[in-house]
Image: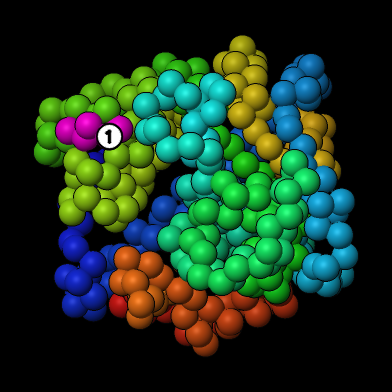
Amino acid sequence: MTHSTTTEPRRARRAESGGGRRRTQRGRRRWGRIVLLGLLIVLLAGGGAGYWLYSGLDGNIKGVDLNEALGDDRPEKLPTAGQNLLVLGSDSRAGDNADLGTGKVAGARSDTALVVHIPEGRQQAVAVSIPRDTLVSRPECTAADGTDHAAADRVMFNSVYSLAGPACVVKTVEKMSGVRMDHYVEIDFAGFKGLVDAIGGVTVTVDEPIKDSSSGLDLSAGTHKLDGTESLAFVRTRHGVGDGSDLGRIGLQQQFLIALLSEIKRQDLLGSPTKTYQIADTLTSALTTDSELASLTSLADFARSMNGVDPATMETVMLPVAYDTQDPNRVVPADPQAAQLWEAVRSDSEIPESAKKSPATGG
């Protein structure tokens, strides 16, 4: 299925018709649902009947002790509030990621962020997407190397990771939402590239040529089978599509992940122990979780606890945001919609329609 890779400038987006707004909302929900389904595939790959065959991969997973890092200054955990999982995709350029054509920016940032809420009873999940250029108040944090960072206002959300690490991202999300995160899952670029190579590539079709010197992507119009490095460039490119903003990149990400999941389904990878092992080895090497999930056994147990969740019923919303009045290239949480959204997650209740409206997208 081919999706348009052309996007309008922000000013034009603000003036979209009601039909255009509805399309934007549907696309945003589809994107979040695809990401969440991908997460479930990762978890369920380790949670099958033969997960014990892969127990030797436990050492691949890196763990973060959130309780030790964050202490007691956290939102209260309500006994009937379900489970909350912070999912990050990091754009680290270090180690195995150094030669992936992802640019020369030092350090790493949280390129994708989802707060996944799994209600009590594990019936229907909700994923809240936090735009990476949202301006937030970062609380006082201590990095893994012991460096203390003072609290700061009006910092970009995706910069928190590079400054102080994953625990500070969790703390920032908890402060802005009032929602306690039970678990943390992060995957970096190397895992993404390895997944595509493990399944033998992913086929995409583009209507127009894409040439981006920053990502290294150079595709003619037509159908292409992309390897891991090319796929990474495809989902990272933005200068060669649309108006050069993140809007075009999101469109490519939607298209690619649909193609990726279609390829996984076509190959029945989860029914092949050899393929599953390759994927599990690749992903666990690029996976960081909270210490409670940092083993295949724990991931399998968590996956089995989600067996009642039907991906078809999952709801995905974007954190309601508005353009910042001082910097139109940045957004800020929009109240009262954002407050209503987080309150619904905290109380394990249905998200009201008013909390799904984002002034920045005209929704």
Q: Is residue 113 magenta?
A: no
- The span picked out in magenta is 211-215
Instruction: Describe the element under mark 1 as helix, strand or loop.
Output: loop
Q: Residue at x 65, y 47 (%)?
A: 165
Tell me the kind of residue under disc 1: Ser
Placement of 174 over or under 325, stated as above or below: above
Image coordinates of residue 173 in percent, x first then y, are 64, 64
Q: Which residue is mark 1?
A: 214
Is residue 298 visible in the rendered image? The answer is yes
Q: Residue at x 32, y 53 (%)?
A: 246
Placement of 80 over or under 183, stated as above or below: below
Q: Nearer the viewer, residue 10 or 223?
A: 10
Image coordinates of residue 203 in percent, x first then y, are 30, 27
Image coordinates of residue 79 in percent, x first then y, are 87, 70
Q: Is residue 212 magenta?
A: yes
Q: Is residue 105 left or right of residue 45?
A: left
Q: Quadrant of the C terminus?
A: bottom left
Residue furthest to the top: 274
Q: Main secondary structure of the magenta part?
A: loop
Q: Is residue 292 left or right of residue 256?
A: right
